[in-house]
Image (cartoon, helix red, strand yellow):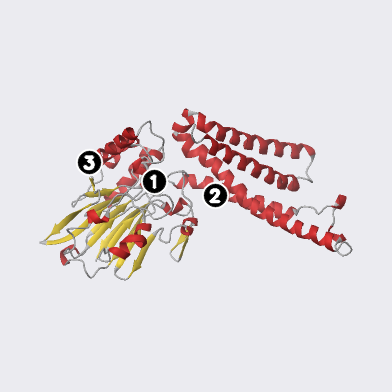
Amino acid sequence: MRNASTWWIIALIMLLLDLYVYQALKTVTQNSNEKTRMLVQVVYWVISGLTLVTLLSFPYTQALQSSKFFRNYIFAFMAGLFFAKLLGSVFFMTDDLRRGGLWLMLKLFPNTGAQFMGEGNTIPRSTFMSWLGLGIGGSVFGTLLYGFTNKYSYQVKHIKLSFASLPKSFKGLKIIHISDIHSGSFQNKEAVNLGVDLILRQNADLVLFTGDLVNDRADEMTEYMDVFGRVNAPLGVYSSLGNHDYGDYVIWPSEQEKAANLERLKQVHANLGWRLLMNEHVLLEKEGEQIALLGIENWGAKGRFPKYGKMKEAYPGTEKIPFKLLLSHDPSHWDAEVKIAYPDIDLMLAGHTHGMQFGLENPYFKWSPVQWMYKQWAGLYEEGNQKLYVNRGYGFIGYPGRVGILPEITVIELL
């Protein structure tokens, strides 16, 4: 398989990491009896060995590639183990740097550093640092397992936004903003349905969806058409595409099949009763006044995310409309193009980041590793007269859970 070499490289890295962590494990169990040491080591290597075998089998086993349970849970379990070991290794390496420094001092000043020598003229590993690394790595792994229970814990966030350019008849307009459904990851239809109940209870005037309806394939929505088909609003439901909607992350038998999948997904939006905006705009009218709703295909300024979106096609015809709202999946689009070339876009709605589904958040503070890549990654951002809101996502992908950053239904009231 084309990607098999990548998986072998990943497995080799994990094996080296396993060997490194094993040294710390031997240190913390050195004072235990032989039976305990043997049990701990056997369990450690059985889990590590099964992980490596599974990784190496993945590119050759179609059943693993197509299994939702594997992709959601087994893969996440292995990824959690990897990151826990990687984090623990930071502490082990700190201790090894200490040992290396002492060794160097002993070589340079053999008569002053003898007190640091252990048995056999070696510098022993620090039991404290080994325990600390294992403890912190284990805590992270345990937290990730706990996060499995939060993936359907939908939170409703209410926000009021004031705009001088908003026509009087649209004051008080209530918008539901959802993003990143990722239907291919769901395994609890009842829980997803309860989330839609929450959406409907908000009695919004307008519902806006900012992309990633599926993980890769249009047929991932088959089981959930009746669920999301219930989403409606007096002024309609409008949607846009995200990076996952194009099927760019799977290998298709041909470009024709990939294109056909995208066409099927467009039809899914239509069958749901959602108006999919493909580099275009619509005008919403109320009491003789208008606002413009623009929607573009995915446009990402980070990494290898594609730039399918075309503002030059969506914008013309809105120049004289006093208030403009843009649906654009990737928040990096705001800094890279919207603020620069379209300063009269009053509000942009985005998603994409999921808040990495991991972080810390309270009314006074929010943090997630995703902020190292995205300047705008969750919540409201303002610059001058322009505003950006980044939804934390309705669904999940990769890691089947949420730690600190919960799935979001946003209620926006325009003032």
Residue type at the position of mark 3: Ala
Establish if 29 lies above or below 372: above
Question: Residue 74 appears at what percent x and percent y?
Answer: 52, 37
- Which residue is located at x 47 percent, y 35 percent? 69
391 relative to 320 in the view: left or right = right
Establish if 367 lies above or below 220: below
- Which numbered disc covers residue 143? 2
Q: Nearer the viewer, mark 3 or mark 2?
A: 3
Q: Residues within 10 Å of mark 2 (few under 14, many from 20)?
A: some
Helix or strand or loop: what does disc 3 sit on? Answer: helix
Q: Nearer the viewer, mark 3 or mark 1?
A: 3
Q: Would you say the residues marked 1 and 2 are in contact, meaning their CB atoms lie under 8 Å apart?
A: no
Q: Which image quadrant is residue 284 in? A: bottom left
- Tell me the quadrant of the picture where the C terminus can be found: bottom left
Which of marks 1 and 3 precedes in the sequence?
3
Question: Residue 47 appears at what percent x and percent y?
Answer: 62, 36
- Which residue is located at x 84 percent, y 59 percent? 107
- Which numbered disc covers residue 395? 1
Which of marks 2 and 1 precedes in the sequence?
2
Helix or strand or loop: what does disc 2 sit on? Answer: helix
Q: Which residue is mark 3?
A: 270
359 relative to 269 in the view: left or right = right
Q: Residue furthest left?
A: 288
